[in-house]
Image (spheres, helix red, strand yellow):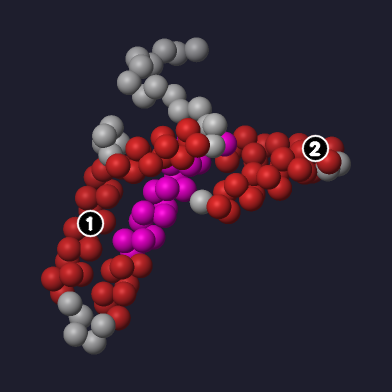
Amino acid sequence: MRMFNIVCIVLQDIIKFGNLTQMSASDGIYDAMASVEFVFILHSMIEMLGITDDLYQAFQYKSQDILNAMQLVSSIKTFSRNLENMGGDPLFEKVKLFCKNHNIEVPNLNAPYKVG
């Protein structure tokens, strides 16, 4: 996630030293990146692409290890189900840790929803 830090630093520099248009656009991008929603999507994509790459690699072998491929497909299904129920999911724990390390506020998802 080193690239995340680099992009944030560049955006902050543009916000400080850019022209008005650049400052405004960079500020909006930085705010979006510094949200738990963005971080969750980022980590979800990393996980999904990792599983997909493993599946692709399994299909590249001439022997095509079907058992391994079926296990990877099962992993994708499990990952998708875990996205729906993200309570104690290890992915969400990674997201919370990343947010903590980058000073991104994580809302209390167990709090009751209040309109307004």
Is 33 on the left or on the right of 107, as rendered? right
What is the residue that sits farthest to the right in this orientation? 19
Helix, strand or loop: magenta stretch: helix
The residue singled out by tag 1 in the image is 75
Residue 92, quarter of picture: top left
Provide residue 58's location: percent of width, then percent of height: 26, 75
Q: Residue at x 26, y 83 (%)?
A: 61
Q: Give the amino acid at mark 2.
A: Lys
Provide residue 33's location: percent of width, then percent of height: 57, 40
Write down the region rendered in magenta.
34-52
Looking at the image, is mark 1 or mark 2 earlier in the sequence? 2
The residue singled out by tag 2 in the image is 16
Residue 31 against residue 52 in the figure, above or below = above
The mark tally for this picture is 2
Q: Residue at x 28, y 48 (%)?
A: 80
Q: Residue 49: within the magenta? A: yes
Q: Which mark is residue 23?
A: none
Q: Give the amino acid at mark 1.
A: Ser
Q: Residues within 10 Å of mark 1 (few under 14, many from 20)?
A: some
Is 74 on the left or on the right of 89, as rendered? left
Q: Residue at x 36, y 61 (%)?
A: 50
Secondary structure beneath dot 1 equals: helix
